[in-house]
Structures are given as structure tokens and as C-alpha cells.
């Protein structure tokens, strides 16, 4: 029997418990159960107060996201809240874990809120391309004021219970058993005959802003930063603005309309896709819950350069001691100085206390002695990207590392199986590919070797989560998922320059699309010399990038690359334009106007094609995994859902046909559509269909 909400009694107090694992989401059965239980408690004359709480790890964490886009079944959450609103007995929400979204809205329908210590409360709808749709935009400002509510709603970030108490969002923090504390609180309210003011009637915290409505725009200006191209933040601001002058019932209706418009929109669909894709990516075929990860108490990172330094910071940040190893003292010193500087910057920004900086630095063991890795449970190699160098190093590592240690390489392109082969413990070896800056970027590609042991893979996944990364398992191939697709994009970007576009045209089209930066600005940031060296090794040439590198224009670090730099901001350079035009002439290419639309098609369709090949070859498990890689590793806009989801919205037939045309016109075989893309295009299918069929 579907009975996710129950009612029990503690004397004169009714206790309503939501029990809908894992996060007590408000699916239809829960809303119905809440409606029935509140009605029953309201109508029972022997009940004098009502407590609502959640079983398991959290109070209600929001609406059930899987129900969005399906026909809604009454009662809606707003019906439940309206019912509670009209109850004249004290109603108390007793919350723990993460009361979020609709869950927090439910609590704001009650007269009072008590929270367990450690609770985090928030309205994260914005992260799903939505706004709170059950009164949140009206009630939160009434409880905490617009100054606090607006940033909470626009960021979607939850706040800890003690801040919620200080702000007036909760009335008491309960130490010890939550429900016992809530019942005691209810009795106190009854004994003291506290007035039962509904949240919807509280106007106190709005008085100030209503008297100075121009302050609203000042608050908006402080917080509405990264909203370019996004619909939800604008809607949230519009809804919150109504607290200034619109009666709450009318404002809630309008809020609902805004919510419903967003829910059917492409942006929210894309962001919901990412929410689930990220969680799916954590599930690795063949690695069930029965595969226990190995215990990781100490880490060692070899290489104190930009990557090694960033990687080791991740460990220290979560309290894991890390040995960082370099060849010589000078390089080690430089590496440690950079790490210290990075922490210092966090202290200056206020995101880290000097005390915690000290604690983190104390976890580092910098050394030039490779033998120091002998105590590490995980060893991550982050040295120069060169196969012979890595092989030689792994030969040494395996002689020193303790039995059972996970041996990882941070290679971004090389064959992990080949590296593993030089050791006598192939199953312990895998790739852990971090993205620069490694202490900031969320993505972690975990490269599963042909013979990597299941528990080694499970360990890498667990470590990834522990150090706050989004781990995605990928297979062995040149560049794995992210860089392999990036290279497809890079080749086209170069071609576009030769055909008529300038770096600022290409980068401009991509930033307008939603990327934080385009390929040429990115190249300047990473250093043009990096790709140049690797191409030289492989005997390939990128005409323009290589000409720039040969002229000593390495990008930001030399003040010149595809752009000119004063500080970090790029400026188009007439010299580069001349160099590009000369290259076109030299190669006999007639320059023409290249439209923004063509730039997007030429850059992203080949990525989609490469993504389809990656799926065919089993390098990625699901299209959603590829989307997660591109979102967290390369800044693909979340509201477009990643390249594969975006391709579905464009239409796979359209993409396939355009790729065919490109292949014909350019003679470039890489544009020939992948078999999977052809099949789906012929069937009128999508990558989402493919994912569903594969999962079934
Ligand atoms: C909303 O409330 C709109 C209202 O304003 C208006 C309504 C009218 N629904 O993340 P985890 C699943 S919008 C359905 O791994 P954690 C999740 O997919 C909603 N499913 O755990 C996963 O499934 P699986 C506002 C959900 O401990 C499992 O639960 N609320 C939902 O790391 C465990 O999740 C939010 O946006 C959901 N709402 O983190 C909160 N939430 O095991 C979204 C989770 O099959 N949720 N699942 O892969 C979260 O932020 C995190 O899940 C949470 C727990 C912090 C709660």
C-alpha cells in the first residue's frame, strides 16, 4: 500500500511523518497523504497542535523532479499549504537534513519551524531553471526580509540552521531528538498562548523596503550577476518584486504562472537533465554496492607543477594528508609557493580562515624523495605529458608503493593501459584526469583501463566524491571524452579562421551561445605552446596557432597570443588579423563572411558526431555522461544541457544532414556521420531515446 505519510499522537500533539525515501520528495502520494493527515488533525478536537516531520536522512527535499512535465495530479503543493494556512491550531515543522524547495515552502506554510543542528535550508529551484512555485518567493521575504531572501533564491544555495535562526527562518534549533524537541516546543507555544501569525500575514520585515522601493534594484544589482541568457533569475526577481506591492494571494498566483512557464521551457528541461545525468554518472555498470572501495587515508602526488599542485590541494582541503614530490628543490619550492598563494587568495576573499589555511598547509609533506610515496594509499602521477617519462616513472612507483595502493595517472591523452603494462600490478592502475585549475574545476574523468580492478574503480569514484569533484568514468582512447571532443572543435575553429572568421568572431559566437570563453581565448589562457609542442610530436600542424607560437606568441603568459593582453582582458590584434589573412592567401583559401550560425554548427556538430562515436565505442557509458563532462570540464552552458542533450533539441536529422554536407564539401572524412548518429537520425530518435533503450 502506498502510504508515505502517517499520523500518530503524542498526547494532545499530532505528529505527521513523511516517509518517502530517499529524500521525501513531494510526489503525488505524499501531497495526498499530507492533505489527508492535516485534515484529520485539524478536525480532531483532541489534537491541540500539529508537528510535521520527515523520516530518514532528511525532511522533504522538494517537489519530485521526475513529475515535472507530466500532467499534475491534485492536490498540488499549494493546496496542501493553503490547507495548513487555515488551521487555527499551532502548526510546527520539525526539519533536519536538507529541507529544500517545495520542502521549505511546506515549512513556511506552518506557524513555526524548529530545526536539528546541521540542517541546511534553501530554495534551490534556480539550479533547475525554475523559481519556487508554491509561495517561496513571497514567504521567504516575509520571514527573513528581501535583503536575505533575494540572494538565497538567486543563488539557490542553502543556509545552515544557525544562520536560518539568526535570520528568522527558524524559531529554534533542537539539540537531541528532533521530534521530542518539536513536541516540547508545541507544548510551550500552547502554554504561553503564543499568537499564531501566519507567515503570509507577516509584513514586519517588508516595511523597510516598501518604504524605500528603490532599494530593491540596489539589492538586485548586487546579486544578479551571472544571469546572461537565463530565464529563471529574471522570473525570480519579478516574483520577489511583488512583495513590495502585490497582495500575497495574487502574487502567489502570478508566481505559479511564472513557474509553470519555466517548467515547460527548454532551459529548465536541460538543467533537470543535468541534475539526473550527474547522479546517473555516479553509477558504473558492473560496480554494484557490493564492491567496497579501498580505504584512503594518505595520498601522494608526483609533480608540483600547476596540475600536481592543484590536485594535492584537493586532498588537503578535505583533511587528507598529501605527500607532494618533485625532482628538485627549486621546483618543489615554486610549487609550494603557488599552493600557498592560492590559499592566501581564498583568505583574502574571505572563503577561508587563516587558521584553516594553516591546517591545510600542515597536511602537505613536500619532498624530493620518491620513496616518500611508500605510505600513500593512492598515488597520482602528474608529471610531463610524455609516454616514455610516464612509463619510467610508473616502473619506479610500483617498486615503492605499498601493496594495494591505487596508482593513478593524470594523463590527459595517453594510453592508460600502456602505462599500466610497465607495472606488475595492472589492476591497481587507472587514470584520474583532473581539469585545470585542478583545485577549482569540478570534473574528474576516471579512466578505466582494460584490466582495472572493480574496487580500484570504486575507490577512485569515492575519492572523487570525497574531494568534491563530479567523477565520470570513461574508457581508454586518445583524449578520452572531453579532450577528444575538444580536438574535433579545435580543428574546425582553425579552419573557420582560414575561411574568413577572426578569433573574436568565433569566440564571440560561443560566448553568446553560453560558454564562458571561446576556443581562442581558452588557448591563450592554457598557452598556445602546449598544443604546438604536442602537435610537433605527432607531426601535425595547425597553421595559425603554430605560426603564432613560432612568433613567440604563447598567449596570456607572453601578453600576446590570438589576442593582445593588458592584464587578463583580451583585445583583438590587427597583427593577428594580418597573419590570418596572409595564411588564407598562402593556402589559397578565398575568405568570405562566416555567420554566427555557421560558427556554432561548424564547432558543435562535429563534437556531437565525435560524442556519438564515443558512445558507439563504449568510451562513455551514456550520452548524459558526455554532457556532464562538458558542463563541468569545459563550461558548456548548463541551461543547454550539454552537447548531446542540446543535439536532441536541435534535431539529430538536421545535424546529420549538415555533417554530410560538410563532409562532401570539405572532403574531410571526420565529418562523415557516426553510425549511431545515422541510425538515430533515420529513426527520428534522440540520444535520450538511446540512453533509455540502453538502460532498459
Ligand atoms: C521544487 O521543489 C519546486 C517547488 O518550488 C514548487 C512545486 C510546486 N525529486 O543527490 P542524491 C533523488 S523543485 C526526485 O544522490 P545526496 C536523486 O535523483 C525541487 N528525486 O543524494 C537520487 O536518486 P538515485 C527543489 C530526487 O544526499 C536520490 O534522490 N529541490 C530529488 O547527495 C539521492 O539524491 C531540489 O532541487 C527530487 N527533488 O543529496 C533538491 N532530490 O539514487 C534536489 C533527489 O536514483 N536534490 N532525488 O540517483 C538535491 O539537491 C540532493 O538530492 C539532496 C541530497 C541535497 C536533497
Image (spheres, rainbow, N blue to C red):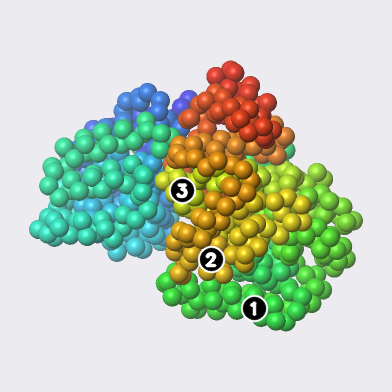
Residues 500 and 109: in front is 500
Image depth: mark 1 or mark 2 in front: 2
Q: Foreground residue, 320 or 626?
A: 626
Where residue 74 sits, quadrant-wise, is top left
Residue 505's mark?
3
Q: CA distance from mark 3 to mark 1?
A: 38 Å
User: How far separated are the C-alphas under marks 3 and 2?
Assistant: 18 Å
Q: Position of residue 342 (x, y in %)?
A: 53, 72
Q: Is residue 649 left or right of residue 428?
A: left
- Quarter residue 309 falls in: bottom right
**Residue at the image position 31 percent from the left and 28 percent from the top:** 75
Location of mark 2 (residue): 560
Contact? badges 1 and 2 (CB < 8 Å): no
Visible residue check, residue 611: yes
Q: Position of residue 180 (x, y in %)?
A: 38, 53
Query: Which mark sits nearer the N-terminus, 3 or 1?
Result: 1
| Element carrying mark 3 | helix
Provide the residue designation for mark 1.
334
Above or below — where is 479 with respect to 531? above
Whether label 3 lies within 8 Å of ligand 1 gets the answer no
- In the rendered view of the protein, which quadrant contains the C terminus? top right
Question: How many angstroms separate mark 1 from mark 2 (CA)?
Answer: 24 Å
Tag 2, which secondary structure? loop
**Of label 3 and label 2, which has the lower sequence position?**
3
Image quadrant in which you'd find residue 553: bottom right
Given this view, does label 3 or label 1 mark the residue nearer the observer?
3
Amino acid at each position: 500500500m502506498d502510504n508515505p505519510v502517517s499520523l500518530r499522537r503524542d498526547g494532545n500533539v499530532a505528529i505527521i511523518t513523511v516517509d518517502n525515501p530517499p529524500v521525501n520528495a513531494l510526489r503525488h502520494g505524499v501531497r495526498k497523504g499530507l492533505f489527508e493527515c492535516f485534515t484529520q488533525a485539524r478536525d480532531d478536537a483532541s489534537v491541540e497542535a500539529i508537528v510535521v516531520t520527515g523520516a530518514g536522512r532528511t525532511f522533504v527535499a522538494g517537489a519530485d523532479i521526475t513529475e515535472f512535465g507530466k500532467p499534475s495530479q491534485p492536490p498540488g503543493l499549494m493546496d496542501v499549504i493553503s490547507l495548513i494556512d487555515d488551521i487555527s491550531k499551532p502548526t510546527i515543522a520539525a526539519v533536519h537534513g536538507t529541507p529544500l524547495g517545495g520542502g521549505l515552502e511546506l515549512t513556511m506554510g506552518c506557524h513555526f519551524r524548529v530545526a536539528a543542528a546541521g540542517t541546511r535550508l534553501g530554495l534551490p529551484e534556480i539550479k533547475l531553471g525554475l523559481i519556487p512555485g508554491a509561495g517561496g518567493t513571497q514567504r521567504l521575504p516575509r520571514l527573513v526580509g528581501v535583503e536575505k531572501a533575494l540572494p538565497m533564491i538567486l543563488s539557490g544555495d542553502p543556509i545552515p540552521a544557525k544562520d536560518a535562526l539568526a535570520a528568522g527562518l527558524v524559531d529554534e534549533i533542537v539539540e537531541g531528538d528532533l521530534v521530542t524537541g518539536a513536541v516540547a516546543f508545541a507544548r510551550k507555544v500552547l502554554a504561553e498562548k503564543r499568537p499564531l501569525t501566519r507567515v503570509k500575514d507577516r509584513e514586519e520585515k517588508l516595511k523597510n523596503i516598501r518604504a524605500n522601493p528603490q532599494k530593491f534594484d540596489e539589492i538586485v544589482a548586487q546579486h544578479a550577476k551571472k544571469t546572461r541568457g537565463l530565464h529563471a533569475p529574471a522570473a525570480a526577481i519579478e516574483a520577489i518584486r511583488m512583495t513590495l506591492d502585490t497582495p500575497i494571494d495574487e502574487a502567489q498566483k502570478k508566481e505559479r504562472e511564472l513557474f509553470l512557464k519555466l517548467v515547460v521551457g527548454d532551459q529548465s528541461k536541460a538543467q533537470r537533465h543535468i541534475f539526473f545525468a550527474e547522479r546517473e554518472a555516479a553509477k558504473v555498470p558492473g560496480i554494484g554496492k557490493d564492491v567496497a572501495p579501498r580505504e584512503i587515508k594518505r595520498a601522494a602526488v608526483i609533480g608540483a607543477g600547476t596540475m600536481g599542485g592543484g590536485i594535492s590541494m584537493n586532498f588537503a582541503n578535505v583533511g587528507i594528508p598529501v605527500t607532494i614530490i618533485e625532482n628538485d628543490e627549486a621546483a618543489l619550492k615554486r610549487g609550494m609557493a603557488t599552493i600557498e598563494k592560492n590559499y592566501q587568495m581564498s583568505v583574502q576573499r574571505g572563503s577561508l580562515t587563516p587558521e584553516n589555511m594553516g591546517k591545510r598547509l600542515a597536511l602537505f609533506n613536500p619532498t624530493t624523495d620518491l620513496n616518500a610515496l611508500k605510505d600513500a594509499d593512492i598515488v597520482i602521477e602528474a608529471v610531463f605529458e610524455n609516454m616514455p617519462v610516464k612509463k619510467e616513472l610508473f616502473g619506479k612507483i610500483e617498486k615503492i608503493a605499498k601493496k594495494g595502493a591505487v596508482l593513478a595517472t593524470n594523463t590527459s591523452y595517453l594510453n592508460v593501459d600502456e602505462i599500466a603494462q610497465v607495472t606488475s600490478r595492472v589492476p591497481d592502475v587507472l587514470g584520474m584526469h583532473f581539469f585545470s585549475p585542478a583545485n577549482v574545476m569540478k570534473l574528474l574523468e576516471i579512466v578505466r583501463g582494460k584490466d582495472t580492478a572493480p574496487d580500484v574503480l570504486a575507490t577512485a569514484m569515492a575519492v572523487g566524491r570525497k574531494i568534491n569533484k563530479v567523477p565520470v568514468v570513461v574508457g581508454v582512447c586518445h583524449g578520452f571524452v572531453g579532450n577528444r571532443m575538444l580536438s574535433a572543435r579545435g580543428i574546425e575553429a582553425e579552419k573557420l579562421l582560414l575561411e574568413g572568421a577572426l578569433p573574436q568572431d568565433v569566440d564571440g559566437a560561443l560566448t553568446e551561445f553560453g560558454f564562458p570563453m571561446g576556443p581562442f581565448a581558452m588557448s591563450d589562457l592554457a598557452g598556445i605552446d602546449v598544443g604546438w609542442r604536442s602537435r610537433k610530436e605527432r607531426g601535425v600542424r595547425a597553421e595559425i596557432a603554430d605560426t603564432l607560437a613560432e612568433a613567440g606568441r604563447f598567449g596570456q603568459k607572453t601578453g600576446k597570443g590570438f589576442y593582445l593582453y593588458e592584464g587578463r582582458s583580451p583585445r583583438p590584434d590587427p597583427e593577428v588579423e594580418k597573419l590570418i589573412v596572409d595564411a588564407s592567401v598562402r593556402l589559397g583559401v578565398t575568405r568570405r563572411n562566416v555567420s554566427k550560425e555557421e560558427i556554432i554548427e561548424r564547432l558543435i556538430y562535429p563534437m556531437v558526431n565525435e560524442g556519438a562515436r564515443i558512445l558507439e565505442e563504449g568510451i562513455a557509458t551514456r550520452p548524459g555522461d558526455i554532457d556532464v563532462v562538458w558542463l563541468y570540464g569545459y563550461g558548456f552552458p548548463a541551461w543547454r544541457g550539454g552537447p548531446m542533450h542540446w543535439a536532441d533539441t536541435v534535431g539529430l536529422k538536421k545535424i546529420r544532414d549538415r555533417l554530410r554536407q560538410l563532409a562532401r564539401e570539405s572532403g574531410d572524412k571526420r565529418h562523415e556521420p557516426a553510425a549511431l548518429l545515422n541510425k538515430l537520425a533515420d529513426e527520428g530518435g534522440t540520444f535520450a531515446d538511446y540512453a533509455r533503450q540502453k538502460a532498459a
